[in-house]
Image (cartoon, rainbow, N blue to C red):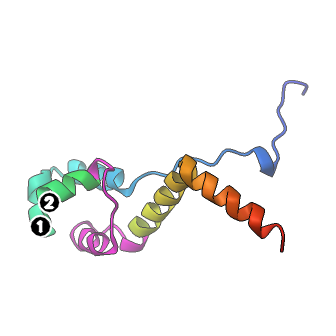
Amino acid sequence: MKDMKIYSLNNLVPSTPVHPGEIIKDEIEARGISQRKFASIIDCSYTVLNEILNCKRPVTTDYALRIEAALGIKACMLVNMQGEYSLQAARRDNRMEAILSKIRSAAAVF
């Protein structure tokens, strides 16, 4: 028992959200569809799709709906995954943390 660590809500580390591009990439690879073919299917440029699949571009609601139509992956799931991923990235940004810290200090006065 002495080796067990006790965790409180204050020191839990959140899991790292997955960019939805990773899920989409896995799915099209599993189905044997090339990125170029899939880009054509969803009426998207290859470059944009490749950036989404490589987590360099967000999945917008527009693309989420197109992907849902093509693969059956729920658009709301893709959009929610993107939101979680984007929030986590923003929380890790030092500039954003400085802004939030300043806001918290100012709001503490109220």
Q: Residue at x 84, y 69 (%)?
A: 109
Q: CA distance from mark 1 to mark 2?
A: 5 Å
The foreground one among 88 and 110 is 110
Q: Are marks 1 and 2 in contact (CB under 8 Å)?
A: yes
Q: Residue at x 76, y 44 (%)?
A: 11
Residue 6: horizontal and vertical position, in percent? Answer: 84, 38
Q: Amino acid at mark 1?
A: Ile
Q: Which residue is mark 1?
A: 41
In the orientation shown, which residue stands out farthest toward the right? 2
Q: Amino acid at mark 2?
A: Phe
105, above or below 17, in the image: below
- The quarter in which the N terminus is drawn is top right
Density class for disc 1 (Cα within 10 Å; few <14, some 14-19, many ≥20) is few
Q: Which residue is mark 2?
A: 38
Residue 39: horizontal and vertical position, in percent? Answer: 13, 61
79 sits to left or right of 97: left
2 sits to left or right of 77: right
